[in-house]
Image (cartoon, rainbow, N blue to C red):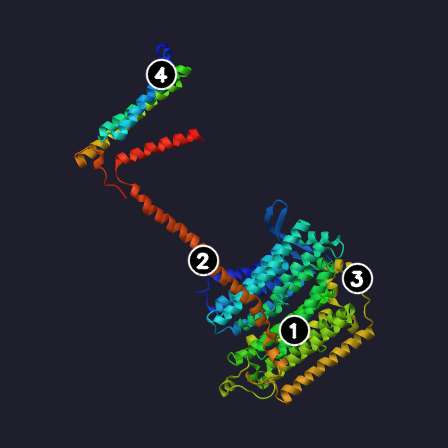
């Protein structure tokens, strides 16, 4: 707790923003579905870190409890996401999202 | 409690009859209907008689509440019946005449495929009419008012396969709606003024108001519009002649004896409101007189036996309104009663003639029916003499009472009223002579078919003839040694008005005798003239296309009132509807609606290409969207 609060809050903000932007960039430029899922995880975790940091900064444990919930939900989400990726692979023998362009107009 | 039960039984019987006949319209055999429908009215009549015998005019009027109907804030409308001399008189007329006409209808409608339907409507009509006269407040009267209008519509259009008849039914319904709107607005005004719609409360409050109060004048004028619609007065009378499209017993019951008198009853019921509005009374008087004269004039030139009687009804209703406007409420009710007797009789007699001639209604093709139909002839003659006002038949006394009051009011009014009564005598004797005297002018086939109607039809004629002949005795004036029984009976209802109204000096007996003599001499002269013209000289039998004088053309064409309405009301309304349909509806509303639709389709067609199917692009757009939302969030 003391280590966390020893670092100024602005550091966390900058760090998390950078992490989040990396995640966003990954989602936008990658064509591999697995890598996109990983980028999404990066975005989620940047938010988690920010929640924990603010929780420490304001001395409010609610933020950290919230992080646990997000982790649970994220685990479920990843499970579903990976299942979808597996199914995509089975049908198209590829996990390149540019192949998935049949559903249009 | 006993009285209470009887009061509720009176309208219950016809309602039951309607429900049973209506539910079993396809299964109930004719013989059962022929007993059930008149039987229900007979039970109603018996209940009314029991009520009447147990009733003493000096006792206060009784209100019998069935249940609380509408209660919202200050608005409290119980479903209640009022029993007082006026409603008892109307009950006796409705159930009595109603029963007689039901019996007659059993004979008249015998061959008709819609036998059960006919009687279910008739029972519903009697039920509605009973509600109308028994209601203890305006809304209950209004239910009956609308109910009789509905039954009138159903029965005018009873032979609905004929397009003309349907149009007549619609015309009656629409004209009545115009009047009903007046009635409804009158009720609204009553409620905002008196905060109640109960007769007793309203009349008690009104009693304390000053004569000529503008609010009262408004209320009474609006109510009179309703009365003019229902009782066929100018300008809403043109539906009644067309209403003759219905079966003849319907014309007798609804369009002569009961429903069309609802307006008179309503004005008499609200007498205190009217007596305090001299302006409205003047309007009623002028309207009534104009209607009486106009309808009598038209009747002289008509050739359809039922149309003549219809115009005669309009004319007689005009007389009743004249009586009301002169403050002769009892006189108007007396004439209403006697008119119910003799006009129902005239219509039933006409029905008997039409029956014998196989549907022929043109009096030019009748004549000489005296020998073939002696009972019909004698009863018809009794009714004619009664309506013409020849003593000692009932019409003389009732008409004379109105004429005398009119003279008290203003001698000029009397002159016009007498002119109308002379016309009445003329057209009625014209009808009588053309129908029953001389030689038969129809085809040989019809001559062979001529027969007197069966007993089920002639017995009602005889009963009504007795009533039409001796009905005058119920209110025999003191001048003839009578005790003015009806006047005494109805006195409690009109007592308050009597004390408000300015008392004209009663006419001295000598004047009364003189007026009566003048009228009577005129009536007899008219009868003689009609006899000379139509029996001795055989005139007035011109075919439709024969050249005619101006007055004859105008009269034959009903003074072109229908054409006038066509021009002033129907055409502009059609034109307006056409304008709204072709311009507003098609050019504007439809285009806006269609425009919205095609706009959506066109936008969709263009925009759907955004749906590229490329997942990366979707994610890019999603993130761009989120960024934009955040951006605008900061901005705002």
Q: Which quadrant holds residue A42? A: top left
Check disc 1 and report the residue beneath it.
B294
Q: Tell me, yes or no, whether the two marked residues, 2 and 4, touch with CB atoms within 8 Å.
A: no
Check disc 2 and report the residue beneath it.
B587
Which mark is on residue B502? 3
Mark 1 crowd level (few <14, some 14–19, many ≥20, 10 Å Cα): many
**In 3D space, how far apart are the residues under numbered discs 3 and 2 (Cα atoms)?**
62 Å
Residue B178 in the image, given as x and y percentages of width and height? 59, 61
Tag 2, which chain? Answer: B
Q: Tell me, yes or no, whether the two marked residues, 3 and 4, touch with CB atoms within 8 Å.
A: no
Task: Say what secondary structure mark 2 lies in.
Answer: helix
Tag 4, which chain? Answer: A
Task: Say what secondary structure mark 3 lies in.
Answer: loop
User: In the image, B73: left or right of B31?
Assistant: right
Q: Nearer the viewer, mark 1 or mark 2?
A: 2
Q: Looking at the image, which residue is at 77% across and 68% down?
A: B409
Q: Which quadrant holds residue B468? A: bottom right
Q: Tell me, yes or no, whether the two marked residues, 3 and 2, touch with CB atoms within 8 Å.
A: no
**In 3D space, how far apart are the residues under numbered discs 3 and 4 (Cα atoms)?**
104 Å
Residue B334 in the image, given as x and y percentages of width and height? 70, 68
User: In the image, B163: left or right of B78?
Assistant: left
């Amino acid at each position: 707790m003391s280590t966390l609060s020893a670092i100024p809050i602005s550091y966390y903000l900058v760090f998390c923003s950078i992490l989040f932007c990396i995640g966003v960039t990954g989602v936008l430029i990658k064509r591999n579905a697995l890598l996109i899922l990983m980028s999404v995880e990066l975005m989620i975790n940047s938010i988690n870190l920010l929640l924990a940091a603010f929780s420490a900064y304001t001395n409010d444990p609610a933020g950290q409890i919230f992080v646990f919930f997000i982790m649970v939900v994220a685990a479920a989400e990843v499970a579903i996401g990976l299942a979808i990726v597996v199914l995509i692979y089975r049908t198209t023998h590829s996990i390149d999202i540019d192949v998935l362009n049949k559903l249009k107009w | 409690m006993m009285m209470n039960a009887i009061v509720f039984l009176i309208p219950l019987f016809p309602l039951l009859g309607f429900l049973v006949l209506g539910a079993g319209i396809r299964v109930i055999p004719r013989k059962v209907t022929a007993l059930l429908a008149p039987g229900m009215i007979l039970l109603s009549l018996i209940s009314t008689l029991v009520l009447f015998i147990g009733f003493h005019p000096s006792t206060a009027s009784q209100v019998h509440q069935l249940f609380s109907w509408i209660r919202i804030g200050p608005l409290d409308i119980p479903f209640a019946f009022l029993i007082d001399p006026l409603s008892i008189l109307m009950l006796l007329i409705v159930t009595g005449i109603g029963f007689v006409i039901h019996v007659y209808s059993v004979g008249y409608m015998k061959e008709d495929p819609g036998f059960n339907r006919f009687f279910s409507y008739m029972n519903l009509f009697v039920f509605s009419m009973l509600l109308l006269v028994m209601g203890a407040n305006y809304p209950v009267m209004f239910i009956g008012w609308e109910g009789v209008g509905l039954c009138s519509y159903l029965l005018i259009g009873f032979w609905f396969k004929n397009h003309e008849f349907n149009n007549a039914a619609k015309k009656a319904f629409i004209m009545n709606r115009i009047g009903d709107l007046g009635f409804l607005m009158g009720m609204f005004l009553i409620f905002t003024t008196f905060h109640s719609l109960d007769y007793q409360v309203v009349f008690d409050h009104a009693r304390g108001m000053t004569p000529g109060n503008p609010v009262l004048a408004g209320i009474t004028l609006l109510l009179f519009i309703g009365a003019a619609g229902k009782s066929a007065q100018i300008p809403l009378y043109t539906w009644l002649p067309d209403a003759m499209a219905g079966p003849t017993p319907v014309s007798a019951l609804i369009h002569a004896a009961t429903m069309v008198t609802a307006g008179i009853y309503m004005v008499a019921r609200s007498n205190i409101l009217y007596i305090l509005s001299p302006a409205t009374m003047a309007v009623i008087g002028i309207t009534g007189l104009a209607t009486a004269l106009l309808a009598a004039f038209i009747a002289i030139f008509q050739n359809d036996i039922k149309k003549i009687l219809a115009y005669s009804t309009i004319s007689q209703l005009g007389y009743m309104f004249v009586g009301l406007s002169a403050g002769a409420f009892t006189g108007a009710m007396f004439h209403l009663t006697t008119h119910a007797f003799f006009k129902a009789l005239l219509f039933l007699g006409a029905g008997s003639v039409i029956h014998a001639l196989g549907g022929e209604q043109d009096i030019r093709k009748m004549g000489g029916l005296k020998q073939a139909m002696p009972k019909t002839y004698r009863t018809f003659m009794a009714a004619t003499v009664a309506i013409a006002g020849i003593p000692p038949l009932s019409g003389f006394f009732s008409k004379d009472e109105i004429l005398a009051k009119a003279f008290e009011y203003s001698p000029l009014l009397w002159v016009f009223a007498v002119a109308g009564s002379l016309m009445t005598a003329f057209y009625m004797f014209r009808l009588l002579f053309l129908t029953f005297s001389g030689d038969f002018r129809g085809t040989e086939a019809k001559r062979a078919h001529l027969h007197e109607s069966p007993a089920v039809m002639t017995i009602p004629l005889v009963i009504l003839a007795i009533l039409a002949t001796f009905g005058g005795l119920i209110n025999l004036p003191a001048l003839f040694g009578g005790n003015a029984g009806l006047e005494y009976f109805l006195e409690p209802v009109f007592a308050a008005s009597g004390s408000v109204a300015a008392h004209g000096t009663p006419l001295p007996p000598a004047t009364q005798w003189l007026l009566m003599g003048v009228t009577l001499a005129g009536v007899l002269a008219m009868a003689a003239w009609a006899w000379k013209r139509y029996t001795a000289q055989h005139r007035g039998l011109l075919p439709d296309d024969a050249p005619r004088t101006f007055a004859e053309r105008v009269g034959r064409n009903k003074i072109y009132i229908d054409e006038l309405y066509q021009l002033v009301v129907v055409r502009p309304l059609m034109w307006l509807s056409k304008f709204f349909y072709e311009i507003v509806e098609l050019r504007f509303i439809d285009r806006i609606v269609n425009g919205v639709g095609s706009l959506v389709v066109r936008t969709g067609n263009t925009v759907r290409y955004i749906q590229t199917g490329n997942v990366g692009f979707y994610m890019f757009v999603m993130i761009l969207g989120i960024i934009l939302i955040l951006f605008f969030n900061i901005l705002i």
